[in-house]
Image: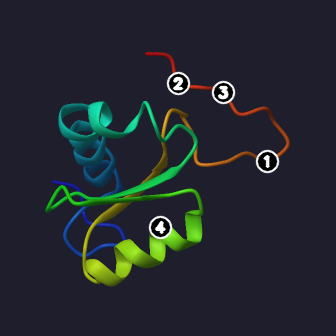
Amino acid sequence: METPTVGHPRYTSKEIVARAKALYEQDIRAKVEADNKGKYLVIDIETGDYEIDADALSVMKRASAKHPNGALFAMRVGYRAMGRIGAKLKEAKL
């Protein structure tokens, strides 16, 4: 097992990403993707609980308040990345 990252005491970054992606695909995508494309989603990988909002900072604050010690993963619904720096944002292919 990999040593957890500085950011979370129980999980490595790879574990957080893998669990979040699995939760999104299995339980969340069908509920949110059609009506929330482009919004920000934060998943607590331990509980499966999630928050969604058009504002990235608001959604992260809300998720952090609900799960102060949670292993949280943030993503943008329908996109491969949260944002961009000097490049065009591409939609995820289904």
User: Within 10 angstroms of label 3, few (less than 14), some, or many (20 or more) residues?
Assistant: few
Q: Which mark is residue 42?
A: none
Q: Which mark is residue 90?
A: 3
Query: Cα distance, mark 1 to mark 2?
Result: 17 Å
Front of the two marks 3 and 4: 4
User: Within 10 angstroms of label 2, few (less than 14), some, or many (20 or more) residues?
Assistant: few
Query: Cα distance, mark 4 to mark 2?
Result: 21 Å
User: Within 10 angstroms of label 4, few (less than 14), some, or many (20 or more) residues?
Assistant: many
Front of the two marks 1 and 2: 2
Q: Which mark is residue 59?
A: 4
Q: Amino acid at mark 2?
A: Ala
Point 23% across, 56% down: residue: 2
In this image, 29 relative to 57: left or right?
Answer: left
Label 3 or label 1, whichever comes before in sequence order: 1
Point 73% across, 45% down: residue: 84
Front of the two marks 4 and 2: 4
